[in-house]
Image: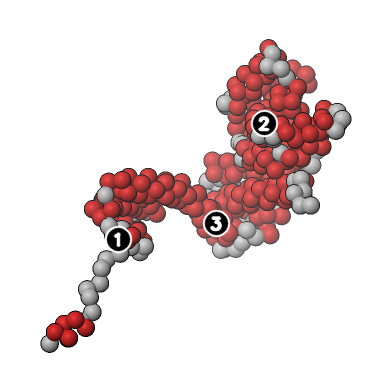
Amino acid sequence: MSKLLTDAPAPAKRNTLTKNQLPGWAIWAVAAGSLILGAAVSSLIGFSLVSWALISAVIFVIAGYVVTLSVEGARKAKDRFATNLIFATFIIAVVPLISVIWTVLQNGIAGLSYNLVFTSMNGMTGMVDNETVANGTEVLGGAYHGIIGTLLITMWATIISVPIGLLTAVYLVEYSKGGALSRGITFFVDVMTGIPSIVAGLFAAALFGLIFGPSTRTGFVAAVALSVLMIPVVVRSTEEMLKIVPNELREASYALGVRKWRTVLKVVVPTAISGIASGVTLAIARIIGETAPLLVTAGFVNSINWNVFGGWMTTLPTYIYRQLMNPTSPTNVEPSMQRAWAAALILIIFVMLLNLFARLIARIFAPKTGR
């Protein structure tokens, strides 16, 4: 009997390293429960993706804190609360973006046909849309003239803004001594960063009105207006990228006898080219969707205009605005809505392609780090 008692296995001792610790699956269980409970609460007030995400995020943060506090103590609970809060804010920030992209895709893909992309609105009337709705045929008239206008005006705005912005940033970082001129430039760049877009349009319209006469509306006038909005973004982003270039690289170049302008051109700018390209892309994305200054400076026309220096010109934002606010057929707005959603999707695609192009440029011109 005593031998059986001595041979019996000893009770398992709990590992002190895992004592008072939640298992790895606990946080996922809290997340799943938060999603379920959030869906239930959201359905009571009118279910939507945004309300579901917000309510679930709040429940997740609170539940994670309470569960951790009951098992691991106050210190771990505070750490868990901060971590969950970061995750929750990330979800809240991403949900509107996903919602916008999903809405545009859902409504815009149906309109991505040859007629809505590679034809213009020249000759399109309300009678045409009425017949389209009555017969159930494909919508005629597209955003081709708006695509051409957007590309041309954005190209000229970039040609104007990027050299001015880059040279201004180089002066502020590499050549200025903190004097009155550099302080004045910094002040005006800060003021221009917050200027309303319609003010930029009025400025360009007034400037060219004084030179060439009133009511001067061309694509180039619109490009000048957009450059007023684009230059401060380029200056600020380029300035910050140049500041983070280590001074040791400049000093090493000077020690080899390289002149300052060549050091800036061959060492400083290539080192910061990735950030500069991203800043330029953000600046282009900032102006490519502007509507108010283009209505003032470029006007609106239903036909294609390839000449930015003469005649009115349509862009995708103004095209979308006109299709929504002034449908071609006031009694049958479905064709105009379809055109507007298709143009919005095309505009988003342009911005995505710009980001990919910026990454490609940054990779090509970035300094080589290998031996």
Mark 1 is surrounded, within 10 Å at the Cα level, by few (under 14), some (14 to 19) or many (20 or more) other residues, namely: few
Residue that mark 3 sits on: 105
Q: Residue furthest left?
A: 1
> Who is closer to the viewer here, 363 or 298?
363
Name the disc covering residue 244, or none. none
* Element assignment for label 2: helix
Mark 3 is surrounded, within 10 Å at the Cα level, by few (under 14), some (14 to 19) or many (20 or more) other residues, namely: some
Residue that mark 2 sits on: 243
Vertically, is 355 above or below 244?
A: below
* Element assignment for label 3: helix
Q: Quadrant of residue 169?
A: top right
* Element assignment for label 1: helix
For residue 246, side relative to residue 90 (left or right): right
Name the disc covering residue 16, or none. 1
Q: Earlier in the sequence, mark 3 or mark 1?
A: 1
For residue 288, side relative to residue 135 (left or right): right
Q: Earlier in the sequence, mark 2 or mark 3?
A: 3
- Colour pattern of the rendering: secondary structure
Vertically, is 153 above or below 32?
A: above
